[in-house]
Structures are given as structure tokens and as C-alpha cells.
Image (spheres, helix red, strand yellow):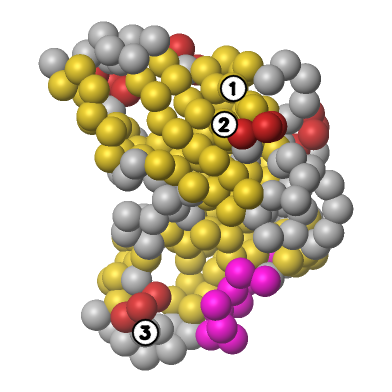
């Protein structure tokens, strides 16, 4: 079974500072990896995804993440935080092929990002 | 519509009542997923459909929960004899086989409160 661990349920940064949100996964084979963002009273929005190819992926709003197979990690970063980045962020994994549960996403518990002026 | 829609957005019901939650996916999207999100947690998979066929219902917690998608478009998640522990945000997502179908597009959710 797959699982996702997000280290730190709350992360607080100052505006302009580096954002680092950690995600580690457990899977028998490397899965597809995703980061979603959830703003208050809104649905989940895809930030970025890793499926194949380059392990450093860029997403919307200046975010990027790097897939490190040896560390089973997919940490999310942004060089300079903006007030509008305050939201809850979820890391998720999905099987790459096969089986009846092929389509489902397995999410981490989420990390709430607070940005201070 | 432009995105996934869900109705109602908020539902308050008394314990023991049945509720039906609706999801209208993005037009043309083959796959439709239901998730449940408790407060302070990530979404948890309930079930999913390809067209009208239910492919996986392993996440449905018990037989009070059921889902259907009879015409391969709109889906309904039904909870019978609701209990307080059913209170949560219920989220629907859809995806297209184009470009691998990797991305799931989520609706705004239905907040269910059982009193």
C-alpha cells in the first residue's frame, strides 16, 4: 500500500523567504507524484506533478519540486514567499499502472503555510 | 461548465436521514472520483468510475455508502442512515484520458454536517 508523510502540519515563513514543504512517500515502485494547494472555501488546485522525465518539475505560481528516488521524497519549494501563498498544501501519490486502484490518489495530511509580512 | 461542480455546497442533516451528494464533472471527462476529507486531514479515496462503470469502491467505509454514475456523466454519492461520524467535506474530481489522465480536477466540495 502507498502512503504519504508530510513533515510539519504548520510552516510559517516571512514574506520573501524560502518556502520548503516536505513530502516523503512509501511505495513498492516509484509512483506518480503531485502537489495540490487548497485555498479557503475552494477546491484543490494542482500545483505541479511528476510522472516521467526530468526530476525537477516546475509548477504554477513559482513553485517547483524535485523527485529524489533514493530519498523517496518530493519536497516543494519556492525561492521567495508571497502573502498570496498562504494556503494548505497537499502532497499526493498515484500508482503508475495496473490494478483496480490504479486511478486513486493517496494524500498526505497537509501542511498549512502561513506567510508573515 | 468550466470546472467540476458539486451540489449542495453545504448540507446539514439529522442523524438517521439519507443524503445524496451530486457531482457534475468536466464535460468529456471519462473518470470520476469521490474523496472524503475530515477536518485537518488530507482527502481519502472513496470510489471511482470510468464512464458508468464503478472501477473501485474499496474506500467506501461501509454499506451505508453507495455511488452511481448511470449515464457516465453526473454522479451521486448516497449515504443512508447518516451518523455523526459521517460529517466531513466530500470532494469530487474528474480526469480525462488525454495526456495520460494524470491530473484530477477537483470540485469545491460538499460540507456535510450530521447533527
Give the farthest residue toward the left: A117
Q: How far, Cα to Cα, is label 3 from label 2? A: 37 Å
Helix, strand or loop under label 3: loop
Residue depicted at 63% across the width and 16% down the height:
A56
Q: Earlier in the sequence, mark 1 or mark 2?
A: 1
Helix, strand or loop under label 2: strand
Q: Nearer the viewer, residue A5 or A40?
A: A5
- 10 Å crowding of disc 2: few (<14), some (14-19), many (20+): many
| A94 over B75 or under it: above or below | above
Across and down, in percent, residue B98 comes to 80, 32
Across and down, in percent, residue A61 comes to 44, 15
- Please report, as a chain letter, where disc 2 is located: A
- Give, as a single range, the part of the protein colored magenta: B58-69
| B102 over A55 or under it: above or below | below
Q: How far, Cα to Cα, is label 1 from label 2? A: 5 Å
Residue B25 numbered tag: none
Mark nearer the viewer, 3 or 2:
2
On the image, numbered disc 3 is attached to which residue? B83
On the image, numbered disc 2 is attached to which residue? A74
- Please report, as a chain letter, where disc 3 is located: B
Mark 1 and mark 2, same subunit?
A: yes
On the image, numbered disc 1 is attached to which residue? A66
Q: Is residue A37 magenta?
A: no
Amino acid at each position: 500500500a502507498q502512503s504519504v508523510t508530510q513533515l510539519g502540519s504548520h510552516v510559517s515563513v516571512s514574506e520573501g523567504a524560502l518556502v520548503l514543504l516536505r513530502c516523503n512517500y512509501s511505495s513498492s515502485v516509484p509512483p506518480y507524484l503531485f502537489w495540490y494547494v487548497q485555498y479557503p472555501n475552494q477546491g484543490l488546485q494542482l500545483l505541479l506533478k511528476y510522472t516521467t522525465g526530468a526530476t525537477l518539475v516546475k509548477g504554477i505560481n513559482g513553485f517547483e519540486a524535485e523527485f529524489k528516488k533514493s530519498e523517496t521524497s518530493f519536497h516543494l519549494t519556492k525561492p521567495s514567499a508571497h502573502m498570496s501563498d498562504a494556503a494548505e498544501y497537499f502532497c499526493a501519490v498515484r500508482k503508475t499502472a495496473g490494478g483496480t486502484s490504479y486511478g486513486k490518489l493517496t494524500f498526505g495530511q497537509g501542511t498549512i503555510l502561513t506567510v508573515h509580512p | 461548465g468550466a470546472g467540476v461542480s458539486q451540489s449542495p455546497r453545504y448540507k446539514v442533516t439529522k442523524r438517521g436521514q439519507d443524503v445524496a451528494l451530486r457531482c457534475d464533472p468536466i464535460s468529456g471527462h471519462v473518470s470520476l472520483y469521490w474523496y472524503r476529507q475530515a477536518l485537518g486531514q488530507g482527502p481519502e479515496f472513496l470510489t471511482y468510475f470510468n464512464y458508468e462503470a464503478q472501477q473501485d469502491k474499496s474506500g467506501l467505509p461501509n454499506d451505508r455508502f453507495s455511488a452511481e454514475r448511470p449515464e457516465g456523466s453526473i454522479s451521486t454519492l448516497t449515504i443512508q442512515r447518516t451518523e455523526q461520524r459521517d460529517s466531513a467535506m466530500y470532494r469530487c474530481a474528474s480526469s480525462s484520458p488525454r495526456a495520460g489522465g494524470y491530473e484530477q480536477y477537483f470540485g469545491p466540495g460538499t460540507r456535510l454536517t450530521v447533527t
